Image: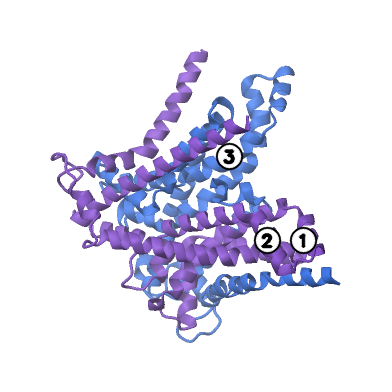
Amino acid sequence: MVMLKKSLKWLFIGIILLFIYSPILLLTVYSFNASETITSWEGFSWTHYEYFFSMDNQPLPIVLQTICLALVVASLSTLLGTVGAIGIFYSRKRTGSFLSGVNQIPVINAEVVTAISLAFLFVAIGVPKSTFIPLIVGQMVLCTPFVILSVIPKLKQMDNNLYEAALDLGASPTKALFSVVIPQIAPGIVSGFMLAVTLSLDDYVIAAYTKPNTFQTISTHIYSLAKGGTVNTIKSSYWAFTAVIFLIIVIAVIVMNVLAHKKAGKKQ
Amino acid sequence: MTKAKFHFSRKLLAIPYALFLALFVIAPLLIIVYYAFTNGDTGSFTFDNFRNFFSGTGGDTFWESSRFKTIVQSLGISVLSTVVCLLIAYPIAYIIAFKVKNKMGLLILFIVPMWVNFVLRINALKELLEWIGIYNKSNGWNIFNTVLGMVYDFLPFMVLPIYTTISKIDKSYLEAARDLGAAGSTAFLKVTLPLSKAGIMSGVSMVFLPSMTNDVISNYRTFNHTKIIGAFIDECFKNDLWNLGSVTALLLLTLMFLITWLTGGFSAEPENGSRGTSLW
Protein backbone atom coordinates (compact mmCIF):
# COMPACT_ATOMS: atom_id res chain seq x y z
CA MET A 1 0.00 0.00 0.00
CA VAL A 2 2.75 2.39 0.97
CA MET A 3 4.73 1.32 -2.09
CA LEU A 4 1.73 1.93 -4.31
CA LYS A 5 1.20 5.39 -2.83
CA LYS A 6 4.83 6.22 -3.33
CA SER A 7 4.93 5.11 -6.95
CA LEU A 8 1.65 6.95 -7.66
CA LYS A 9 3.23 10.11 -6.26
CA TRP A 10 6.24 9.83 -8.57
CA LEU A 11 4.05 8.84 -11.52
CA PHE A 12 2.03 12.04 -11.06
CA ILE A 13 5.12 14.22 -10.71
CA GLY A 14 6.65 12.49 -13.74
CA ILE A 15 3.63 13.07 -15.98
CA ILE A 16 3.45 16.76 -15.11
CA LEU A 17 7.20 17.22 -15.64
CA LEU A 18 6.86 15.44 -18.99
CA PHE A 19 4.08 17.89 -19.93
CA ILE A 20 6.21 20.87 -18.87
CA TYR A 21 9.38 19.75 -20.62
CA SER A 22 8.19 17.91 -23.73
CA PRO A 23 7.64 21.02 -25.93
CA ILE A 24 11.15 22.32 -25.29
CA LEU A 25 12.74 18.86 -25.65
CA LEU A 26 10.90 18.28 -28.93
CA LEU A 27 12.22 21.58 -30.31
CA THR A 28 15.70 20.70 -29.10
CA VAL A 29 15.59 17.40 -30.99
CA TYR A 30 14.25 19.00 -34.17
CA SER A 31 16.74 21.86 -33.97
CA PHE A 32 19.21 19.26 -35.30
CA ASN A 33 16.89 18.25 -38.12
CA ALA A 34 18.22 18.81 -41.63
CA SER A 35 14.83 20.06 -42.81
CA GLU A 36 12.69 22.95 -41.63
CA THR A 37 9.63 20.94 -40.72
CA ILE A 38 8.76 19.31 -37.46
CA THR A 39 6.76 16.51 -39.04
CA SER A 40 9.59 14.48 -40.56
CA TRP A 41 13.15 13.69 -39.53
CA GLU A 42 15.62 14.09 -42.36
CA GLY A 43 18.97 13.53 -40.77
CA PHE A 44 21.27 15.30 -38.34
CA SER A 45 22.63 18.72 -39.20
CA TRP A 46 23.91 21.95 -37.65
CA THR A 47 22.16 24.12 -40.31
CA HIS A 48 19.77 25.84 -37.92
CA TYR A 49 22.57 26.68 -35.52
CA GLU A 50 24.78 28.04 -38.28
CA TYR A 51 21.90 30.17 -39.55
CA PHE A 52 21.10 31.45 -36.08
CA PHE A 53 24.66 32.32 -35.09
CA SER A 54 25.40 34.43 -38.17
CA MET A 55 25.14 38.21 -37.76
CA ASP A 56 24.04 38.42 -41.42
CA ASN A 57 20.71 36.79 -40.61
CA GLN A 58 17.80 38.34 -38.76
CA PRO A 59 17.60 36.40 -35.47
CA LEU A 60 20.96 37.10 -33.81
CA PRO A 61 20.85 40.93 -34.09
CA ILE A 62 17.29 40.84 -32.77
CA VAL A 63 18.36 38.73 -29.79
CA LEU A 64 21.22 41.13 -29.08
CA GLN A 65 19.04 44.23 -29.27
CA THR A 66 16.47 42.57 -27.00
CA ILE A 67 19.24 41.96 -24.45
CA CYS A 68 20.41 45.59 -24.75
CA LEU A 69 16.86 46.82 -24.22
CA ALA A 70 16.49 44.56 -21.17
CA LEU A 71 19.73 45.91 -19.66
CA VAL A 72 18.71 49.54 -20.23
CA VAL A 73 15.20 48.99 -18.85
CA ALA A 74 16.47 46.96 -15.88
CA SER A 75 19.14 49.55 -14.98
CA LEU A 76 16.68 52.44 -15.11
CA SER A 77 14.04 50.46 -13.19
CA THR A 78 16.56 49.42 -10.55
CA LEU A 79 17.72 53.01 -10.05
CA LEU A 80 14.17 54.40 -9.89
CA GLY A 81 12.94 51.47 -7.79
CA THR A 82 15.77 51.51 -5.26
CA VAL A 83 15.50 55.26 -4.69
CA GLY A 84 11.72 54.93 -4.60
CA ALA A 85 11.81 52.04 -2.11
CA ILE A 86 14.05 53.99 0.27
CA GLY A 87 11.75 56.99 -0.08
CA ILE A 88 8.60 54.93 0.49
CA PHE A 89 10.15 53.16 3.47
CA TYR A 90 10.96 56.43 5.25
CA SER A 91 7.73 58.23 4.25
CA ARG A 92 4.89 58.80 6.63
CA LYS A 93 2.80 55.65 7.05
CA ARG A 94 -0.15 56.93 5.04
CA THR A 95 1.94 58.18 2.09
CA GLY A 96 3.98 54.99 2.15
CA SER A 97 1.03 52.64 2.07
CA PHE A 98 -0.68 54.73 -0.61
CA LEU A 99 2.41 54.52 -2.83
CA SER A 100 2.77 50.80 -2.14
CA GLY A 101 -0.86 50.35 -3.14
CA VAL A 102 -0.38 52.21 -6.43
CA ASN A 103 2.80 50.17 -6.91
CA GLN A 104 0.63 47.02 -6.89
CA ILE A 105 -1.51 48.22 -9.82
CA PRO A 106 0.90 47.25 -12.64
CA VAL A 107 1.62 43.98 -10.83
CA ILE A 108 -1.96 42.78 -10.74
CA ASN A 109 -3.34 44.62 -13.76
CA ALA A 110 -3.86 42.74 -17.02
CA GLU A 111 -0.87 43.48 -19.22
CA VAL A 112 -3.04 44.33 -22.18
CA VAL A 113 -4.80 47.03 -20.13
CA THR A 114 -1.47 48.47 -18.96
CA ALA A 115 -0.17 48.44 -22.52
CA ILE A 116 -3.23 50.07 -24.09
CA SER A 117 -3.52 52.72 -21.41
CA LEU A 118 0.14 53.64 -21.95
CA ALA A 119 -0.35 53.71 -25.70
CA PHE A 120 -3.28 56.14 -25.16
CA LEU A 121 -1.11 58.29 -22.90
CA PHE A 122 1.75 58.57 -25.37
CA VAL A 123 -0.66 59.48 -28.16
CA ALA A 124 -2.21 62.11 -25.87
CA ILE A 125 1.08 63.73 -24.90
CA GLY A 126 2.42 63.39 -28.43
CA VAL A 127 5.49 61.21 -27.90
CA PRO A 128 5.96 59.06 -31.03
CA LYS A 129 6.90 55.38 -30.69
CA SER A 130 9.98 55.90 -32.86
CA THR A 131 11.68 57.73 -29.96
CA PHE A 132 11.86 54.44 -27.97
CA ILE A 133 10.56 56.41 -24.97
CA PRO A 134 7.17 54.60 -24.92
CA LEU A 135 8.89 51.20 -25.09
CA ILE A 136 11.42 51.93 -22.35
CA VAL A 137 8.93 53.66 -20.07
CA GLY A 138 6.35 50.95 -20.76
CA GLN A 139 8.68 48.17 -19.70
CA MET A 140 9.78 50.26 -16.70
CA VAL A 141 6.14 50.38 -15.58
CA LEU A 142 6.20 46.59 -15.73
CA CYS A 143 9.56 46.11 -13.97
CA THR A 144 9.94 48.86 -11.35
CA PRO A 145 7.18 47.59 -9.02
CA PHE A 146 9.07 44.31 -8.72
CA VAL A 147 12.29 46.15 -7.85
CA ILE A 148 10.37 47.97 -5.11
CA LEU A 149 8.95 44.65 -3.89
CA SER A 150 12.44 43.13 -3.69
CA VAL A 151 14.11 46.11 -1.99
CA ILE A 152 11.50 46.97 0.68
CA PRO A 153 11.81 43.64 2.58
CA LYS A 154 15.60 44.24 2.82
CA LEU A 155 14.99 47.73 4.22
CA LYS A 156 12.67 46.20 6.81
CA GLN A 157 15.36 43.71 7.85
CA MET A 158 18.03 46.44 8.08
CA ASP A 159 19.34 47.54 11.44
CA ASN A 160 18.43 51.21 11.54
CA ASN A 161 20.92 51.93 14.36
CA LEU A 162 23.82 51.56 11.92
CA TYR A 163 22.60 54.50 9.87
CA GLU A 164 22.18 56.67 12.95
CA ALA A 165 25.60 55.57 14.21
CA ALA A 166 27.13 56.67 10.89
CA LEU A 167 25.48 60.06 11.30
CA ASP A 168 26.64 60.36 14.91
CA LEU A 169 30.17 59.56 13.77
CA GLY A 170 29.97 62.49 11.39
CA ALA A 171 28.90 61.04 8.06
CA SER A 172 26.64 63.22 5.95
CA PRO A 173 23.18 61.73 5.23
CA THR A 174 24.20 61.10 1.59
CA LYS A 175 27.44 59.42 2.65
CA ALA A 176 25.59 57.30 5.22
CA LEU A 177 23.05 56.34 2.59
CA PHE A 178 25.71 55.13 0.17
CA SER A 179 28.09 53.45 2.58
CA VAL A 180 25.62 52.05 5.11
CA VAL A 181 22.12 51.68 3.69
CA ILE A 182 22.93 50.68 0.10
CA PRO A 183 25.38 47.87 1.02
CA GLN A 184 22.83 46.40 3.41
CA ILE A 185 20.02 46.32 0.87
CA ALA A 186 22.34 45.25 -2.00
CA PRO A 187 20.96 41.67 -2.23
CA GLY A 188 17.48 43.11 -2.73
CA ILE A 189 18.76 45.51 -5.40
CA VAL A 190 20.52 42.68 -7.24
CA SER A 191 17.50 40.39 -7.20
CA GLY A 192 15.31 43.32 -8.28
CA PHE A 193 17.65 43.94 -11.21
CA MET A 194 17.65 40.26 -12.22
CA LEU A 195 13.88 40.15 -11.99
CA ALA A 196 13.63 43.28 -14.15
CA VAL A 197 15.93 41.75 -16.79
CA THR A 198 13.81 38.58 -16.91
CA LEU A 199 10.54 40.51 -17.09
CA SER A 200 11.82 42.70 -19.91
CA LEU A 201 13.20 39.74 -21.89
CA ASP A 202 9.92 37.91 -21.39
CA ASP A 203 7.63 40.79 -22.28
CA TYR A 204 5.52 40.59 -25.39
CA VAL A 205 2.38 42.63 -24.72
CA ILE A 206 3.92 45.96 -23.65
CA ALA A 207 6.50 45.81 -26.45
CA ALA A 208 3.85 45.03 -29.06
CA TYR A 209 1.96 48.23 -28.20
CA THR A 210 4.82 50.62 -27.57
CA LYS A 211 7.79 49.60 -29.73
CA PRO A 212 8.85 51.53 -32.85
CA ASN A 213 7.47 49.87 -35.98
CA THR A 214 10.87 48.92 -37.32
CA PHE A 215 12.19 47.55 -34.02
CA GLN A 216 11.72 43.91 -33.04
CA THR A 217 12.28 42.04 -29.80
CA ILE A 218 12.62 38.26 -29.63
CA SER A 219 8.99 37.96 -28.51
CA THR A 220 7.46 40.21 -31.16
CA HIS A 221 9.60 38.67 -33.89
CA ILE A 222 8.70 35.05 -33.13
CA TYR A 223 5.07 36.03 -32.75
CA SER A 224 5.04 37.74 -36.14
CA LEU A 225 6.70 34.72 -37.74
CA ALA A 226 4.14 32.37 -36.25
CA LYS A 227 1.26 34.58 -37.39
CA GLY A 228 2.42 34.05 -40.94
CA GLY A 229 2.03 30.33 -40.37
CA THR A 230 4.68 29.46 -42.93
CA VAL A 231 7.58 27.07 -42.62
CA ASN A 232 10.81 28.97 -43.00
CA THR A 233 14.46 29.07 -42.14
CA ILE A 234 14.18 31.96 -39.67
CA LYS A 235 11.46 30.20 -37.74
CA SER A 236 13.38 26.95 -37.42
CA SER A 237 16.59 28.77 -36.49
CA TYR A 238 14.69 29.91 -33.39
CA TRP A 239 14.38 26.26 -32.42
CA ALA A 240 18.15 26.25 -32.18
CA PHE A 241 17.92 29.40 -30.06
CA THR A 242 15.34 27.78 -27.75
CA ALA A 243 17.68 24.81 -27.30
CA VAL A 244 20.66 27.08 -26.55
CA ILE A 245 18.70 29.17 -24.04
CA PHE A 246 17.42 26.05 -22.36
CA LEU A 247 20.94 24.61 -22.12
CA ILE A 248 22.26 27.86 -20.60
CA ILE A 249 19.47 27.88 -18.02
CA VAL A 250 20.03 24.25 -17.08
CA ILE A 251 23.77 24.85 -16.65
CA ALA A 252 23.10 27.98 -14.59
CA VAL A 253 20.68 26.12 -12.31
CA ILE A 254 23.15 23.26 -11.80
CA VAL A 255 26.02 25.67 -11.05
CA MET A 256 23.83 27.61 -8.61
CA ASN A 257 22.80 24.39 -6.87
CA VAL A 258 26.37 23.15 -6.60
CA LEU A 259 27.50 26.51 -5.19
CA ALA A 260 24.64 26.52 -2.70
CA HIS A 261 25.57 23.01 -1.57
CA LYS A 262 29.22 23.97 -1.15
CA LYS A 263 28.20 27.01 0.90
CA ALA A 264 25.93 24.87 3.08
CA GLY A 265 28.75 22.34 3.46
CA LYS A 266 31.19 24.99 4.63
CA LYS A 267 28.75 26.31 7.20
CA GLN A 268 28.40 22.85 8.71
CA MET B 1 17.89 68.97 14.57
CA THR B 2 20.07 66.84 12.32
CA LYS B 3 17.64 64.00 12.79
CA ALA B 4 14.73 66.04 11.46
CA LYS B 5 16.87 67.06 8.51
CA PHE B 6 17.87 63.61 7.33
CA HIS B 7 14.41 62.14 7.77
CA PHE B 8 13.21 64.94 5.56
CA SER B 9 15.83 64.20 2.93
CA ARG B 10 15.17 60.48 2.83
CA LYS B 11 11.46 61.00 2.40
CA LEU B 12 12.20 63.19 -0.58
CA LEU B 13 13.56 60.12 -2.36
CA ALA B 14 9.98 58.92 -2.84
CA ILE B 15 9.18 61.90 -5.07
CA PRO B 16 10.66 60.66 -8.38
CA TYR B 17 8.84 57.36 -8.12
CA ALA B 18 5.64 59.03 -6.98
CA LEU B 19 5.79 61.26 -10.08
CA PHE B 20 6.53 58.23 -12.26
CA LEU B 21 3.50 56.39 -10.83
CA ALA B 22 1.26 59.43 -11.24
CA LEU B 23 2.29 59.99 -14.85
CA PHE B 24 2.64 56.44 -16.15
CA VAL B 25 0.28 54.39 -13.99
CA ILE B 26 -2.51 56.65 -12.73
CA ALA B 27 -2.80 59.06 -15.68
CA PRO B 28 -3.12 56.26 -18.27
CA LEU B 29 -5.91 54.66 -16.22
CA LEU B 30 -7.69 58.03 -16.02
CA ILE B 31 -7.49 58.23 -19.81
CA ILE B 32 -9.18 54.82 -19.98
CA VAL B 33 -11.92 56.05 -17.64
CA TYR B 34 -12.29 59.19 -19.79
CA TYR B 35 -12.71 57.19 -23.02
CA ALA B 36 -15.09 54.76 -21.32
CA PHE B 37 -17.49 57.55 -20.36
CA THR B 38 -17.30 59.79 -23.43
CA ASN B 39 -18.70 59.74 -26.92
CA GLY B 40 -16.13 59.03 -29.62
CA ASP B 41 -17.21 61.82 -31.96
CA THR B 42 -18.18 64.70 -29.70
CA GLY B 43 -16.30 63.91 -26.52
CA SER B 44 -19.40 64.46 -24.39
CA PHE B 45 -20.28 62.41 -21.32
CA THR B 46 -22.26 59.26 -22.03
CA PHE B 47 -23.09 55.76 -20.82
CA ASP B 48 -23.54 54.57 -24.41
CA ASN B 49 -20.24 52.70 -24.48
CA PHE B 50 -21.38 50.45 -21.65
CA ARG B 51 -24.71 49.92 -23.43
CA ASN B 52 -22.82 49.10 -26.62
CA PHE B 53 -20.63 46.64 -24.81
CA PHE B 54 -23.58 44.70 -23.43
CA SER B 55 -25.95 45.05 -26.38
CA GLY B 56 -23.37 44.55 -29.10
CA THR B 57 -24.27 47.70 -31.05
CA GLY B 58 -22.13 50.64 -32.05
CA GLY B 59 -21.04 49.70 -35.55
CA ASP B 60 -18.47 47.12 -34.51
CA THR B 61 -19.47 44.11 -36.52
CA PHE B 62 -16.97 41.71 -35.00
CA TRP B 63 -18.36 42.35 -31.55
CA GLU B 64 -21.99 42.33 -32.66
CA SER B 65 -21.73 38.81 -34.03
CA SER B 66 -19.64 37.17 -31.37
CA ARG B 67 -20.29 39.13 -28.18
CA PHE B 68 -21.80 36.42 -26.00
CA LYS B 69 -19.57 33.77 -27.45
CA THR B 70 -16.51 35.81 -26.53
CA ILE B 71 -17.63 36.61 -22.98
CA VAL B 72 -18.85 33.08 -22.21
CA GLN B 73 -15.90 31.43 -23.93
CA SER B 74 -13.40 33.70 -22.20
CA LEU B 75 -14.91 33.14 -18.75
CA GLY B 76 -15.17 29.41 -19.44
CA ILE B 77 -11.54 29.13 -20.52
CA SER B 78 -10.47 31.17 -17.51
CA VAL B 79 -12.42 29.10 -14.99
CA LEU B 80 -11.33 25.84 -16.58
CA SER B 81 -7.65 26.87 -16.70
CA THR B 82 -7.75 27.97 -13.08
CA VAL B 83 -9.42 24.75 -11.91
CA VAL B 84 -7.05 22.52 -13.89
CA CYS B 85 -4.04 24.51 -12.62
CA LEU B 86 -5.29 24.16 -9.05
CA LEU B 87 -5.96 20.43 -9.40
CA ILE B 88 -2.43 19.86 -10.71
CA ALA B 89 -0.60 22.41 -8.58
CA TYR B 90 -2.04 21.52 -5.19
CA PRO B 91 -0.86 17.89 -5.15
CA ILE B 92 2.52 18.96 -6.53
CA ALA B 93 2.97 21.63 -3.87
CA TYR B 94 1.78 19.19 -1.21
CA ILE B 95 4.17 16.46 -2.33
CA ILE B 96 7.10 18.87 -2.51
CA ALA B 97 6.36 20.36 0.91
CA PHE B 98 5.65 17.15 2.82
CA LYS B 99 6.84 14.09 0.96
CA VAL B 100 10.21 14.83 -0.63
CA LYS B 101 13.72 15.20 0.76
CA ASN B 102 15.27 17.52 -1.83
CA LYS B 103 12.49 20.15 -1.81
CA MET B 104 14.36 22.97 -3.54
CA GLY B 105 15.64 20.68 -6.30
CA LEU B 106 12.17 19.48 -7.22
CA LEU B 107 10.64 22.94 -6.92
CA ILE B 108 13.26 24.36 -9.28
CA LEU B 109 12.40 21.66 -11.84
CA PHE B 110 8.92 23.16 -12.03
CA ILE B 111 10.21 26.71 -12.34
CA VAL B 112 13.08 26.30 -14.82
CA PRO B 113 10.91 26.36 -17.97
CA MET B 114 9.65 29.79 -16.89
CA TRP B 115 13.06 31.26 -17.56
CA VAL B 116 12.74 30.49 -21.25
CA ASN B 117 11.16 33.42 -23.09
CA PHE B 118 7.36 33.26 -22.87
CA VAL B 119 6.71 33.45 -26.63
CA LEU B 120 9.45 30.87 -27.32
CA ARG B 121 7.77 28.55 -24.84
CA ILE B 122 4.30 29.01 -26.31
CA ASN B 123 5.81 28.53 -29.76
CA ALA B 124 7.37 25.26 -28.57
CA LEU B 125 4.01 24.05 -27.29
CA LYS B 126 2.40 24.95 -30.61
CA GLU B 127 5.03 22.91 -32.46
CA LEU B 128 4.38 19.98 -30.12
CA LEU B 129 0.63 20.16 -30.77
CA GLU B 130 1.30 20.31 -34.49
CA TRP B 131 3.61 17.31 -34.17
CA ILE B 132 0.95 15.32 -32.30
CA GLY B 133 -1.58 16.48 -34.85
CA ILE B 134 -4.18 18.29 -32.73
CA TYR B 135 -3.21 21.83 -33.68
CA ASN B 136 -5.97 23.89 -35.31
CA LYS B 137 -8.13 20.85 -36.03
CA SER B 138 -11.56 21.86 -34.81
CA ASN B 139 -13.16 24.32 -32.43
CA GLY B 140 -13.25 21.73 -29.66
CA TRP B 141 -9.55 21.03 -29.98
CA ASN B 142 -8.85 24.75 -30.15
CA ILE B 143 -10.49 25.37 -26.80
CA PHE B 144 -8.70 22.34 -25.36
CA ASN B 145 -5.39 23.66 -26.73
CA THR B 146 -6.04 27.15 -25.34
CA VAL B 147 -6.67 25.75 -21.87
CA LEU B 148 -3.58 23.56 -22.26
CA GLY B 149 -1.54 26.64 -23.19
CA MET B 150 -2.82 28.59 -20.18
CA VAL B 151 -2.07 25.69 -17.82
CA TYR B 152 1.36 25.19 -19.38
CA ASP B 153 2.20 28.83 -18.89
CA PHE B 154 0.58 29.62 -15.53
CA LEU B 155 1.18 26.40 -13.58
CA PRO B 156 4.25 27.72 -11.69
CA PHE B 157 2.24 30.77 -10.55
CA MET B 158 -0.15 28.37 -8.86
CA VAL B 159 2.50 25.96 -7.51
CA LEU B 160 4.69 28.63 -5.86
CA PRO B 161 2.22 30.42 -3.56
CA ILE B 162 0.57 27.14 -2.54
CA TYR B 163 3.97 25.59 -1.81
CA THR B 164 4.95 28.65 0.26
CA THR B 165 1.87 28.42 2.48
CA ILE B 166 1.89 24.63 2.82
CA SER B 167 5.56 24.54 3.77
CA LYS B 168 4.88 27.05 6.56
CA ILE B 169 2.22 24.87 8.17
CA ASP B 170 3.32 23.76 11.60
CA LYS B 171 3.49 19.96 11.43
CA SER B 172 2.61 19.59 15.10
CA TYR B 173 -0.98 20.61 14.20
CA LEU B 174 -1.16 17.58 11.95
CA GLU B 175 0.37 15.35 14.60
CA ALA B 176 -2.11 16.68 17.13
CA ALA B 177 -4.98 15.90 14.76
CA ARG B 178 -3.68 12.36 14.28
CA ASP B 179 -3.14 11.88 18.03
CA LEU B 180 -6.69 12.99 18.67
CA GLY B 181 -7.89 10.25 16.37
CA ALA B 182 -8.40 11.96 13.02
CA ALA B 183 -7.85 9.79 9.96
CA GLY B 184 -5.28 10.95 7.42
CA SER B 185 -7.95 12.32 5.11
CA THR B 186 -9.79 14.08 7.94
CA ALA B 187 -6.57 15.69 9.13
CA PHE B 188 -5.95 16.90 5.59
CA LEU B 189 -9.45 18.32 5.14
CA LYS B 190 -9.64 19.92 8.59
CA VAL B 191 -6.06 21.12 9.03
CA THR B 192 -3.89 21.25 5.91
CA LEU B 193 -6.51 22.47 3.44
CA PRO B 194 -7.87 25.35 5.58
CA LEU B 195 -4.32 26.44 6.46
CA SER B 196 -3.30 26.56 2.80
CA LYS B 197 -6.25 28.75 1.83
CA ALA B 198 -4.13 31.90 1.50
CA GLY B 199 -1.84 30.24 -1.02
CA ILE B 200 -4.77 28.89 -3.03
CA MET B 201 -6.36 32.33 -3.11
CA SER B 202 -3.26 34.07 -4.34
CA GLY B 203 -2.61 31.32 -6.89
CA VAL B 204 -6.16 31.59 -8.19
CA SER B 205 -5.90 35.36 -8.54
CA MET B 206 -2.63 34.97 -10.44
CA VAL B 207 -4.09 32.51 -12.93
CA PHE B 208 -7.70 33.60 -13.36
CA LEU B 209 -7.25 37.12 -14.72
CA PRO B 210 -4.25 36.46 -16.97
CA SER B 211 -6.03 33.51 -18.55
CA MET B 212 -8.88 35.82 -19.46
CA THR B 213 -6.58 38.36 -21.07
CA ASN B 214 -3.55 36.53 -22.39
CA ASP B 215 -4.42 36.67 -26.07
CA VAL B 216 -0.92 35.60 -27.11
CA ILE B 217 -1.80 32.12 -25.93
CA SER B 218 -5.30 32.06 -27.40
CA ASN B 219 -4.04 33.47 -30.72
CA TYR B 220 -1.18 31.05 -30.91
CA ARG B 221 -3.39 28.09 -30.23
CA THR B 222 -5.98 29.00 -32.72
CA PHE B 223 -5.35 32.21 -34.62
CA ASN B 224 -8.57 33.95 -33.67
CA HIS B 225 -10.93 31.01 -33.52
CA THR B 226 -10.97 31.02 -29.76
CA LYS B 227 -11.47 34.67 -28.99
CA ILE B 228 -11.01 35.84 -25.41
CA ILE B 229 -11.56 39.24 -23.78
CA GLY B 230 -7.89 40.19 -24.12
CA ALA B 231 -8.03 39.59 -27.87
CA PHE B 232 -11.18 41.70 -28.07
CA ILE B 233 -9.51 44.69 -26.41
CA ASP B 234 -6.65 44.27 -28.85
CA GLU B 235 -9.05 44.25 -31.81
CA CYS B 236 -10.86 47.36 -30.53
CA PHE B 237 -7.58 49.20 -30.32
CA LYS B 238 -6.47 48.12 -33.80
CA ASN B 239 -9.84 49.10 -35.30
CA ASP B 240 -9.81 52.56 -33.64
CA LEU B 241 -12.77 51.67 -31.39
CA TRP B 242 -11.10 53.32 -28.42
CA ASN B 243 -14.29 53.93 -26.44
CA LEU B 244 -15.50 50.36 -26.63
CA GLY B 245 -12.01 49.09 -25.89
CA SER B 246 -11.77 51.37 -22.88
CA VAL B 247 -15.10 50.16 -21.49
CA THR B 248 -13.88 46.58 -21.74
CA ALA B 249 -10.57 47.49 -20.14
CA LEU B 250 -12.39 49.35 -17.36
CA LEU B 251 -14.67 46.39 -16.68
CA LEU B 252 -11.62 44.11 -16.53
CA LEU B 253 -9.91 46.54 -14.22
CA THR B 254 -12.92 46.54 -11.89
CA LEU B 255 -12.97 42.75 -11.93
CA MET B 256 -9.26 42.71 -11.16
CA PHE B 257 -9.73 44.97 -8.15
CA LEU B 258 -12.64 42.85 -6.92
CA ILE B 259 -10.67 39.62 -7.23
CA THR B 260 -7.58 41.09 -5.60
CA TRP B 261 -9.62 42.58 -2.80
CA LEU B 262 -11.57 39.37 -2.22
CA THR B 263 -8.42 37.24 -2.21
CA GLY B 264 -6.63 39.65 0.11
CA GLY B 265 -3.96 40.54 -2.43
CA PHE B 266 -3.71 44.16 -1.29
CA SER B 267 -2.82 43.30 2.28
CA ALA B 268 -0.69 40.25 1.48
CA GLU B 269 2.99 40.28 2.32
CA PRO B 270 5.08 40.66 -0.82
CA GLU B 271 6.87 37.35 -0.33
CA ASN B 272 3.79 35.24 -0.91
CA GLY B 273 1.39 37.76 -2.35
CA SER B 274 2.65 39.14 -5.61
CA ARG B 275 3.39 37.15 -8.69
CA GLY B 276 6.98 36.54 -9.58
CA THR B 277 8.62 37.91 -6.46
CA SER B 278 8.86 34.54 -4.76
CA LEU B 279 10.96 33.24 -7.64
CA TRP B 280 14.13 34.93 -6.52
Q: Which residue is mark 3?
A: B162
Q: Is residue A88 left or right of residue B6?
A: left
Measured from the top left, where is residue A16 in percent x and y?
42, 34
Spatial CA distance of label 3 from label 2 is 38 Å
Q: Earlier in the sequence, mark 1 or mark 2?
A: 1
Measured from the top left, where is residue B261 in percent x and y?
65, 55
Query: Which shade is chain A?
Result: purple
| Residue at 51 percent of width and 75 percent of height | B48
Chain designation of label 2? A
Measured from the top left, where is residue B94 in percent x and y?
56, 31
Marks 1 & 2, CB-CB < 8 Å contact: yes
Spatial CA distance of label 1 from label 3 is 42 Å
Is B34 above or below relative to A79? below
| Residue at 17 percent of width and 49 percent of height | A47
Q: Which residue is mark 2?
A: A179
Chain designation of label 1? A
| Residue at 47 percent of width and 57 percent of height | A197
Do the dots labelled 3 and 2 sit on one chain? no
- Farthest-out residue, front: A169
Marks 1 & 3, CB-CB < 8 Å contact: no
- The kind of residue tagged 2 is Ser
Query: Which shade is chain B?
Result: blue
Spatial CA distance of label 1 from label 2 is 9 Å
Measured from the top left, where is residue B159 in percent x and y?
52, 40
Residue at disc 2, secondary structure: helix
Q: Which residue is mark 1?
A: A166
Binning the other alpha carbons within 10 Å of mark 1 as few (below 14), some (14 to 19) or many (20 upward) gives some
Is B191 above or below relative to A199? above
Do the dots labelled 1 and 3 sit on one chain? no
* Residue B178 seen in this snapshot: yes
- The kind of residue tagged 3 is Ile
Chain designation of label 3? B
